Image (cartoon, rainbow, N blue to C red):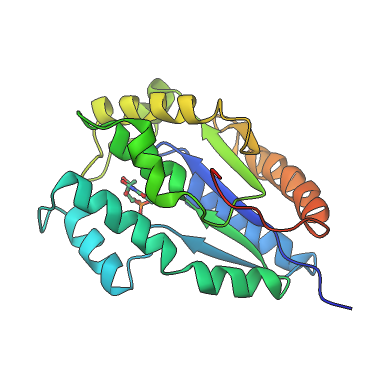
Amino acid sequence: MACKRGALIVLEGVDKAGKTTQCKKLVHALQQSGRPAEMMRFPERTTTIGQLISAYLENKSDLEDHTVHLLFSANRWELVPLMKKKLEQGTTLVVDRYAFSGVAFTSAKPGFCLDWCMKPDVGLPKPDLVMFLQLSPAEAALRGQFGEERYETNVFQRAVQQKFEHLMKDPSVNWRAIDASQSVEDVHENITTHSLNTINAAENLPLGELWK
Ligand code: TMP
């Protein structure tokens, strides 16, 4: 009998919502319970494309806005063969940011519409679950200053949040809003419950194509 596929689980949210901490805790909890799981993150800065993106984010280089949007998308596409292989082998992937960050961040810039921003990512492996870690700008501010990378300002993050809220209205994507103002452990418990349900359901479903 062919092995059951893993689930594609994405965590999204504005900065300081705790995505990376929660991704790591989820992978650990899944592994502890005997379910194969691995973490991935976008941008994946180790590839040639990822290094271009990283230099841009660190303000070490400038790239034209459309160009960098397409590079972020290309960075996802270059990892699709690996993602599919792992999912087929039964490994659940827990992904820190995906195409939704791509669309929310670029469309928060002047002169970009959601529709144009979504196009390059149409057809990517469709997540079985996208959890959006919700945190108000006031609560995010209590968690300390933003870092020094590009996009890490209050004004821009608010614009990004609005774009995420728009994307979450799309019923073709399995969104779950998670209250990220709770304790780390409470958020983890919530995320784990949703993830286990998704992993069980995904076993018997084909992997979908995003926004198609
Ligand atoms: P991170 O590595 O700390 O998650 O930061 C990556 C930054 O890049 C963050 O500000 C969000 C932004 N981003 C985009 O603009 N487009 C994308 O497609 C992705 C994945 C991230």
Residue sitting nearer the eye, 2 or 95: 2
Q: Is residue 116 left or right of residue 167?
A: left
x 65%, y 38%: residue? 174
Residue 15, visible in the rendered structure: no
Q: Quadrant of residue 74?
A: bottom left
x 83%, y 58%: residue? 204
Determine the residue located farthest toward the front in the rendered image.
Answer: 212
> Compared to 207, does 115 lie above or below?
above
Determine the residue located farthest toward the bottom in the rendered image.
Answer: 1
Task: Assign the C terminus to one quadrant of the image.
Answer: top right
Residue 202, visible in the rendered structure: yes
Rendering coords of residue 96 (x, y %): 49, 53
Task: Assign the N terminus to one quadrant of the image.
Answer: bottom right
Q: Is residue 193 left or right of residue 100?
A: right
Rendering coords of residue 184 (x, y %): 59, 42
Please state the total of marks drawn on the protein image. 0
Residue sitting nearer the eye, 113 or 150: 113
x 53%, y 56%: residue? 95
Rendering coords of residue 65 (x, y %): 18, 45
Rendering coords of residue 86 (x, y %): 63, 73
> Compared to 78, does 8 lie above or below?
above
Q: Is residue 82 left or right of residue 138?
A: right
